[in-house]
Image: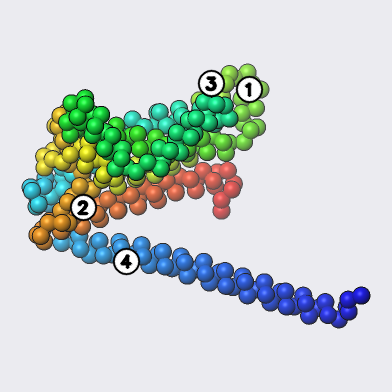
């Protein structure tokens, strides 16, 4: 039989051991966060410092001229391509998310989820090359806005679909049953009860998708090309400028003005993406607070 006087000693050792593990875990978590935060702030600070000479009114009011000028055309092109791809991918992605949530266990749902997972893993440059072969060459659109928008839209589809599926899946089953209880059909329950309740989470996924599209370069090099001029409203046979091309190309030029434009474009892209992510996070926090799951 175990000596009762030994039990307090063992409990003390166990308590000390747990405290040590807790302290070590806390230190590791804080140190990891500090490393990530330091890396993030150093990147932002370096980009801002090198872009500072170019952050002026001219940057927003003049178009690029070779390796100089402003970024008005690139800013406009980025907005056109990103918002256009979001308009193309959102209805299809939300419809796919609804199908996955309602019929995900069926054969069609399993195939759709499998294809969606594959599409997420496809490198963006491969999508750009496929867009180049199909739209730029085969359809004869040449470098154009339509080719860039469709390629980016295809890339965003699985993200919006999966976000929509998860958002609908998180709505309590009692909400669905209440809709059926008042005599609503399946379509009415989905479109007028479940989808509005999942809208904040869907909007968060859309903001993340928009941020993703704004940071892409490879798909647009093969499809949208590049232009030093403002967009004339034509969707085919007309290239367009965008900020990531400036970052990718101008930094390799042996001129200081080109480097300043590249860092200015990088700063603008980083700032907008950061605001989009924070906006998506704010929408999600508001939703959780209304549900009483976040304080």
Question: In what element is the residue under mark 4?
Answer: helix
Label 4: few (<14), some (14–19) or many (≥20) C-alpha neighbours in 10 Å:
few
Q: Nearer the viewer, mark 4 or mark 2?
A: 2
Pointer 4 with pointer 2, Cβ within 8 A? no
Which of the pair 174/66 is nearer the observer?
66
Q: Quadrant of the N terminus?
A: bottom right
Q: Nearer the viewer, mark 1 or mark 4?
A: 4
Q: Which is nearer the N-term, disc 3 or disc 4?
A: 4
Label 1: few (<14), some (14–19) or many (≥20) C-alpha neighbours in 10 Å:
some
Q: Which is nearer the N-term, disc 3 or disc 1?
A: 1
Left or right? Give the position of 182 relative to 273: right
Q: Nearer the viewer, mark 2 or mark 3?
A: 2
Q: Which residue is mark 1?
A: 180
Q: Which is nearer the N-term, disc 1 or disc 4?
A: 4
Pointer 1 with pointer 4, Cβ within 8 A? no
Q: Which residue is mark 2?
A: 247
Where residue 83 sits: x, y (%)? 30, 36
Question: In what element is the residue under mark 2?
Answer: helix
Q: Which residue is mark 4?
A: 42
Question: In what element is the residue under mark 3?
Answer: helix
Rounded to the nearest angstrom, the CA distance separating label 3 from label 4 is 50 Å
Q: Identify the residue at image location x=24%, y=61%.
A: 48
Q: How many dots with numbers?
A: 4
Q: Is residue 185 above or below residue 62?
A: above
Rounded to the nearest angstrom, the CA distance separating label 3 from label 1 is 10 Å
Left or right? Give the position of 152 relative to 234: right
Q: Which is nearer the N-term, disc 2 or disc 1?
A: 1
Where residue 257 sits: x, y (%)? 10, 58
Q: Which residue is mark 3?
A: 187
Q: Identify the residue at image location x=59%, y=48%.
A: 293
Tell me the quarter of the picture where residue 15 sits: bottom right
């Amino acid at each position: 039989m175990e000596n009762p006087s030994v039990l307090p000693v063992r409990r003390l050792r166990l308590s000390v051991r747990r405290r040590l593990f807790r302290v070590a875990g806390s230190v590791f978590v804080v140190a990891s966060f500090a490393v990530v935060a330091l890396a993030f702030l150093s990147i932002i600070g370096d980009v801002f410092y090198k872009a500072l000479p170019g952050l002026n009114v001219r940057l927003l009011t003049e178009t690029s001229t070779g390796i100089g000028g402003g970024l008005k055309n690139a800013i406009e092109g980025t907005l056109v391509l990103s918002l256009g791809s979001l308009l193309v991918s959102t209805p299809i992605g939300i419809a796919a998310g609804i199908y996955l949530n309602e019929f995900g266990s069926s054969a069609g749902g399993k195939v759709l989820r499998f294809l969606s997972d594959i599409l997420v893993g496809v490198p963006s440059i491969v999508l750009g090359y496929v867009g180049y072969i199909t739209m730029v060459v085969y359809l004869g659109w040449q470098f154009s806005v339509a080719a860039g928008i469709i390629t980016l839209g295809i890339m965003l589809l699985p993200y919006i679909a999966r976000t929509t599926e998860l958002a609908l899946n998180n709505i309590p089953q009692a909400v669905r049953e209440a809709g059926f209880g008042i005599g609503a059909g399946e379509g009415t329950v989905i479109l007028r009860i479940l989808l509005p309740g999942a809208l904040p989470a869907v909007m968060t996924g859309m903001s993340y998708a928009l941020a993703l599209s704004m940071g892409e370069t490879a798909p647009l090099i093969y499809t949208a090309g590049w232009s030093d001029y403002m967009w004339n409203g034509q969707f085919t046979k007309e290239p367009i400028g965008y900020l990531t091309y400036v970052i990718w190309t101008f930094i390799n030029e042996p001129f200081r003005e080109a480097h300043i434009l590249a860092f200015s474009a990088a700063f603008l892209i980083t700032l907008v993406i950061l605001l989009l992510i924070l906006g998506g996070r704010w929408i999600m926090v508001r939703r959780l607070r209304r549900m009483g799951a976040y304080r």
